[in-house]
Image (tube, rainbow, N blue to C red):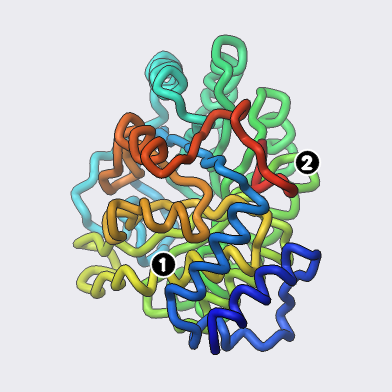
Amino acid sequence: MSEASCLSLAKKIIAGYRIKRRDDLSLFLKAPLAELQEGARLLQDHFCGKHVDFCTIINGRSGRCGENCKYCAQAACHHTGIKEYGFLPKGTILAHARANEAAGANRFAIVTSGRALAGRDFDRAIEAYEAMRNTCHIDLCASHGLLTRAQLRRLRAAGVTSYHHNIETSRRFFPQICTSHTYDDRIRTIKMAQEEGFCVCSGGIIGMGETWEDRLDMAISLAELGIESIPINALMPIPGTGMEGRPQLPAADILRTIAFFRYINPTANIRLAAGRKLLPENGATALRAGASASITGNMLTTSGTTIKEDMAMIAELGLTNREEDCRAVTGTCGAR
């Protein structure tokens, strides 16, 4: 496997070829990382130009979740000591949205714990989204679990343009991390959200004990679903969860994953998420080798990087998150 192999594949993708499940994917695991990243950079430059998409999140309802996802600090079956609270007041959410918009973020998401947001809490979410739509210009994203079609339609009507719902891992490995709902439950929600006109943001977590083949399978599955925004989380093991004590992934493994996700999903926003601090220069190298987006500010239950710091970092890299400065050659590279 050589640099020529990586670059020739990247050029083939630019010319219109798309990687399929039946293809030989061994190049992604055997090629030297630097050579794989060179092809990923070529793809990123072509499909994304110099644009980076920054999204921010607020933990709109925390803890007491009845699902049993092994990695999650918010599951009631885990004892992590996180702060638990009901749905935040509309004014609190609106203030965060305005602050993030003023700082330069591209989009803002309310994320809530639980299998699905419902009842009065869902009504409160709709009221918050309507208030943000009417007073802010930032793009709105929602992450509220396994919603019904009627709920998704209400979100769209309230001004939400993106729906986040991770597949988390491969179909094969999913039962090893969650048994309270199925992989197919998640796929159904994703497809329904797409049918209702949302850009869907869906990715997963690496470092939970899955194989490299599981990571490749996840990348292919997301391509088959036509996902436009793909967050890649590196597990940050939280004491009290089912992943407590798992070793953190080496940076090279995370960077390789980001790079081959770019080949398999060339026009998507490959988004840095949890675990960024495990990467060299807090992810700066990844943003020139496949990643075209990032969550910024604090994560749900782990610390993140401030928007100001990220703005300075991309400026040093010669990148921008301003829509008017985006000059991608082709492709959409996510919901914009």
Report which residue position mark 1 lands on.
255
Look at the image and tell me in which quarter the C terminus lies. Answer: top right
User: Vertically, is 236 above or below 160?
Assistant: below
Question: x, y percentage for residue 285?
Answer: 38, 57
What residue do we see at 74% from left, 37% from top?
150
* Tag 1 and tag 2, C-beta contact below 8 Å: no
| Front position in the image: 241 or 142 | 142
| Front position in the image: 17 or 264 | 17
Asked whether the viewer can see residue 171, the reply is no
Q: Secondary structure at mark 2?
A: loop
User: Vertically, is 175 above or below 185?
Assistant: below
State the residue lying farthest toward the front.
4
Q: Secondary structure at mark 1?
A: helix
Look at the image and tell me in which quarter the N terminus lies. Answer: bottom right
Tag nearer the camera, 1 or 2: 1
Q: CA distance from mark 1 to mark 2?
A: 34 Å
User: Type of residue at label 2?
Assistant: Glu
- Residue 305's label in the rendered image is none
Question: x, y percentage for residue 55?
Answer: 48, 37
* Number of dots carrying numbers: 2
Report which residue position mark 2 lands on.
196
| Front position in the image: 262 or 147 | 262
Question: x, y percentage for residue 199?
Answer: 69, 43
- Crowdedness of circle 1 by 10 Å Cα count: few (<14), some, many (20+)? many
What residue do we see at 61% from left, 73% from top?
7
User: Type of residue at label 1?
Assistant: Leu
| Front position in the image: 183 or 39 | 39
Question: x, y percentage for residue 291?
Answer: 50, 55
- Quarter of the view holding residue 317: top left
